[in-house]
Every structure is written in C-alpha cells, then in structure tokens.
Image (cartoon, rainbow, N blue to C red):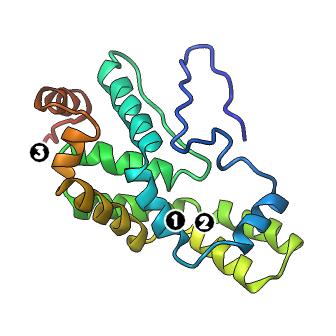
C-alpha cells in the first residue's frame, strides 16, 4: 500500500535497491518472480543489501537522517518490514551497541508480526498458481530466517572485518556520530 500523506511528517523515499519500484508488484508478477528464484535467493539478497554500492549509500542517508533528527520520531519501513527494514534495524542496533543475540531475537519477531499478512499473500498466490517451487520460494521470502541475517553478517565480516569497521568505513559513522546516535536513541532503564 502507498504511504498515507501526513501533514506533520516529512517523507524521505530511500530505495535500498537501485530500482525504486523494487517490491512493488501485483500478485501475478510476484508469482512469476518467485517461480524463477533459486533456493538461496534470500541469502544472496541479504548479502547484496550490505555490499551493493547503491544500498550502502541509501543506508548512509538513513543514518544522516537519524543523526539530523532533532524532534519527533523516525519511522522507517519497506514492503514487508523485515528484509530491507531488517538490515536497517540491524545496522541501527549495531551502532547503538546492542548485542548480536538481541538483534537476532528482534529480527525473528517478524515471523509473528507478519503471520496474518503472510497468510493473505499465500492465499493470493495460490489463486494464481500451485507450482511447488513458487510456493516454496514464497515461504522462503516471507520468513525471517537466522540464515538470512547470518549471510549479511558474513558479507560484512568478509568486506570490512567486523560490524564496527563496516559502520565506520561503509556507513561513514565516526566515533562522534556513534556517540550522538547512542545519546539520541538509547534510554536508560530505571530500576
């Protein structure tokens, strides 16, 4: 669904993929795409989101928006809210010093949050095709899997040596920027 225009919000379209219409398709178009995907498509997609030049530049812009936000909230999303948004969240939480275990737990909550949406999408695709490969690829694309996020971490480690180095060199976050993010976006728990 298109974003609702909100008079009090500033909308920034940050397309993680070079094609700004990525993720925008009819159920029939999506069924055709799914029929041609390889079983490891999602792992490759997650690697691409952290290594592709366009994707990196988009996530850099996201961090600039977070750093420049001085009031109100920042809402970010993608079509399903788990892949491009999942990588965004992983990068943000990493910059805030959140442990990897907690990042995985947060990411995997998408499976519960998207359950009803996924059932609707499955029903739409099954009205178009009963092709086994298509339906299996649909299931793979709908779920949040540890292997997907691990693929992104692996690509980051291969490219930069560590998430910390990736944030510094690829996201262009200085120590000062990291401190600002932590000051602005972390709260202290009161006992």
Q: Residues within 10 Å of mark 2 (few under 14, many from 20)?
A: few
Q: Nearer the viewer, residue 51 or 89?
A: 51
| Residue depicted at 33% across the width and 18% down the height | 68
Nearest to viewer (mark 3 / mark 1): 1
- For label 2, the residue is 115
Report if the CB atoms under discs 2 and 1 are less than 8 Å apart: yes
Residue 181 percent across, percent down from the top left: 22, 31
Q: Nearer the viewer, residue 41 or 23?
A: 41
Q: CA distance from mark 3 to mark 1?
A: 29 Å
- For label 3, the residue is 191
**Is 150 positioned to the left or the right of 43 in the image?**
left
Label number found at residue 112: 1
Nearest to viewer (mark 3 / mark 2): 2
- The disc, 3 or 2, on the residue closer to the chain's N-terminal end is 2
- The disc, 3 or 1, on the residue closer to the chain's N-terminal end is 1
**Mark 1: which secondary structure?**
helix
């Amino acid at each position: 669904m298109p974003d609702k225009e909100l008079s009090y919000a500033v909308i920034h379209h940050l397309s993680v993929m070079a094609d700004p219409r990525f993720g925008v398709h009819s159920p029939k178009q999506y069924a055709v795409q799914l029929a041609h995907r390889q079983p490891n498509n999602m792992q490759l997609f997650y690697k691409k989101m952290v290594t592709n030049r366009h994707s990196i530049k988009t996530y850099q812009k996201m961090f600039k928006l977070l750093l420049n936000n001085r009031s109100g909230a920042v809402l970010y999303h993608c079509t399903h809210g788990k892949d491009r948004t999942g990588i965004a969240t992983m990068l943000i939480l990493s910059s805030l010093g959140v442990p990897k275990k907690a990042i995985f737990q947060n990411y995997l909550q998408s499976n519960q949050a998207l359950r009803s949406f996924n059932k609707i999408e499955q029903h739409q695709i099954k009205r178009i095709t009963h092709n086994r490969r298509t339906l299996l690829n649909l299931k793979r694309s709908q779920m949040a899997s540890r292997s997907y996020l691990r693929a992104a971490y692996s690509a980051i480690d291969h490219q930069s040596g560590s998430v910390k180095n990736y944030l510094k060199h690829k996201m262009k976050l200085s120590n000062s920027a990291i401190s600002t993010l932590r000051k602005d976006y972390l709260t202290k728990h009161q006992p």
